[in-house]
Amino acid sequence: MGTLRVIAFAWWAAVVTALCFTVAMLALVLNPRSARISHRVASLWGRWLLWGAGLRLRIEGPGFLDPNTTRMIVANHSSYLDPPAMLAAHPGQIRFMLKKELMRLPFIGWYTRASGHFLIDRDNPREGKRLLDRAVERAKRYHLNPMVFPEGTRTRDGLLAPFKNGAFQLALSADLPVQPVAILGAYERMPRGSLGPSRGGEIIIRVGEPIPVAGLKGNPGRKVLAEQVETALRALGVE
């Protein structure tokens, strides 16, 4: 049954992704700057993907997810299911912070560049600064919610990995409150290395209170913010 579930999910994910990618790219032609229509398609993609995996989404503390307030979303990262779950859960517009190298990938790279997801360049400080300035400007202009997984990659054991403090620089530069979000249950369904969900069930998006960034600057500020976010995620149930 496990193998059949994986095969069925792979087929479903391929069909849904191809369909939503095509519609989202066409939507970008109609609404290229804020990409609002395209983002709604991405949100629908997230819901359909979870449905095809036999997963239900439960949101706790939804009052903190305000579509009219721009915040930086910070969450733990344990599964490929995390991004679609967040796209399905958040009522506002999310833009993920992605490594620039992902732009080389077909389809994914094309869409993320066209729809305005935020790029990170860790190898070139000058280019990294330019990309950061651009991200700050776009987040404020179009009321976008940057989202980052500060661990940098998916956990191998289900436990919270050390944070990369640089992931918080956008929040400080744009003076954005940080919204801690715990994604629970995704690791148990589709851990790192899995080709598909091993079983159905429930994924919980547990939202904490926003963390202000006023007065935080530079490396000391990023370190303090990282510690506050880690404390908040653990209080929300992340191990």
Image (spheres, helix red, strand yellow):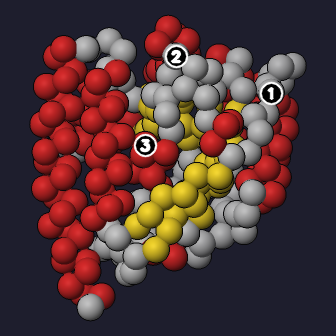
- Alpha-carbon span between mark 2 and mark 1: 17 Å
Looking at the rendering, in which quadrant would you find the N terminus?
bottom left
Q: Which residue, given by chain and number where applicable, does mark 3 sit on?
A: 87
Residue 122 appears in the figure: no
Secondary structure category for the residue under label 1: loop
Q: Is residue 142 visible?
A: yes
**Amino acid at the residue labelled 1:** Pro
Instruction: Indicate the position of residue 45 as horizontal and vertical percent values.
Output: 29, 46
The numbered mark, 2 or 1, whose residue comes first in the sequence reads 2
Q: Amino acid at mark 2?
A: His
Name which of mark 3 and mark 2 comes first in the sequence.
3
Q: Earlier in the sequence, mark 1 or mark 3?
A: 3
Residue wearing tag 2:
143
What residue lies at 46% left-to-right and 36% top-to-bottom? 96
Q: Which amino acid, mark 3? A: Leu
**Label 3 neighbourhood size at 10 Å, few (<14), some (14-19), many (20+)?**
many
Residue under numbered circle 1: 212
- Residues at circles 3 and 2 in contact by the CB criterion of under 8 Å: no
Q: Nearer the viewer, residue 75 or 85?
A: 85
Circle 3: element type: helix
Q: Residues within 10 Å of mark 1 (few under 14, many from 20)?
A: some
x, y (%) of residue 219? 78, 31
Measuring from the top left, give residue 32's x and y in whole percent: 26, 14
Instruction: Indicate the secondary structure of the residue bearing disc 2.
Output: loop
Q: Quadrant of residue 19?
A: top left
